[in-house]
Image: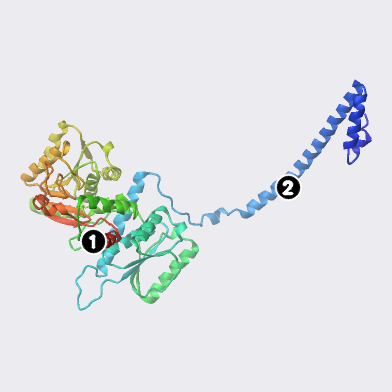
Amino acid sequence: MALPACLLAAAPGPCLAESFEDAGRGGPMQNAVMLAVVIFFILVVGVYALIIFVKRRPSTAYKEEEEAAGLAIPPEVLAKIPQTPAAPADALERHRRIVAMENCARDHACRIAQELGAGAPPEDGRAGPGAVWLLAGPGPLGAICMALARHLESLGVEATVQLLAFTDKLGPEAQAQRKTLLASKLKLIESPTPRHLKSVARIVAGADAELLTEARRADLKKIVAYAAEDGIALEQLDEFSAHYASPPPSADDLVIPASHETLSREDTRLIDSLAQQAYGVPGGALMENAGYWAAREAYFQAQALEKEKGAAAVVALCGRGNNGGDGFVVARHLLSWGYSSEVFLLGLKEKMTDDAGLNLRLLEEAGIKVTPVFDDSQWPLVEKALNAASLIIDAALGTGMHGQVRGQAVDAIRLMNAARAHGAFVLAIDCPSGIDCNTGAPLGACVQADLTVTFAANKQGFALGKGPELCGQIVIADIGLPREIYRRRTAAAG
């Protein structure tokens, strides 16, 4: 059947209208024919449109692929672009890295300050220690450099940090340290532009080369060249290890001084909270510093006991809170320095606070078994260990204790005091367990300590009531608090 001429025309609309009008006047046969014509027309138009789409799509797709290929970064180039380090997903691994970075930063700060003459009495009008310039990369070494600045300030050494990467390229650990520097009002230069540093005594570089772009590597190379030209000593921090361990202490080591303030129980809790919430210092870093300085005192005492008695048997009784966490840090450091400890936990491991629980896990990883004490049948084991001990670490109750001592702590205190009566040396962590740090009164039961290593500042109760008798000798240890906290307190009080 031939198509009507109007279907081949450019504008078939009127013809179709006429056809429908004729169909209305025609019979059923004619209506069927016209319907078939309309359907055929629609099919022809649809097929034509589909052919055009299919013909054009390959060329368009090819063009898109060609453009994408032109924009894509070749794999060999991509491999050379430094990737910003990511934070470990595992909480224990994050804590392990915080511990390693804080220990490394503190140890380097003490060494560098001592080499520059910090803490030494002035001789013949000699100037104080020279300034230190710290070059911080985007990775863990950069984070250590920034933490180093905080400790150097506490040692009285002027420190300036220069970033070798722009802030958006810093890894999470370096970002966190940068926030602490800014809050602490320490000197921070966020431009990597090379410069001559003739007024500084030492340059310390903490830059993982593989994390720097070519431009930043060139900047570092130029700074190194300037340092050589100006005769300035430059040292590069060793490659970061999450398993870094502090070397055994020496009596000749420079010690970071603590504040000369005397704090109440409430003030102690406040500055600890401020350091974490307002200044971004991790609680794990504060605990690590506290445990390190306490371990240092325990190490010297263990050496003296070993010399006197031929051996030093160390037993630690730890609570479930932060004071117990300090005790785990002490035991870990002592182990790395050659003294193993028998460690008891007063309660269940599952009920420990976060940082304390993580330090317990690190201690067990290091090879020390921690024995939980959760019912009366275990006290004979604890008593036997304490009676054989020459050095007891009291880490049961901390400075926040108020109200009467109850439960397992009463038995622990009784057994520690009995072992002391038989000749054991008792070293209390932060405070003797059971003392009221505001009044010096025993809260029912209280440990009689030979030495108390207290943290951040002295406690007002240590000089009141029975405080002097219960504390014994007192050593005040720094825990890495930004000095800006004390400056603000002084300004507020004035």
Is 37 positioned to the left or the right of 392 in the image? right
Residue 238 visible in the current orientation:
no
Type of colouring: rainbow
Amino acid type of the residue tagged 1 in the rendering: Ile
* Residue 194 location (% of width, % of height): 44, 70
Is 64 positioned to the left or the right of 321 in the image? right
Q: Which mark is residue 256?
A: 1
Q: Which residue is mark 2?
A: 59
Residue 398 visible in the current orientation:
yes
The answer to which of 233 and 324 lies nearer the viewer is 324
The answer to which of 61 and 456 lies nearer the viewer is 456
Is 143 positioned to the left or the right of 295 in the image? right
The answer to which of 438 and 291 lies nearer the viewer is 438
Q: Secondary structure at mark 1?
A: loop
User: Looking at the figure, which quarter contains the N terminus?
Assistant: top right
Q: Quadrant of residue 387?
A: top left
The structure residue drawn at horizontal position 72% and vertical position 45%, both measured from the top left corner, is: 58
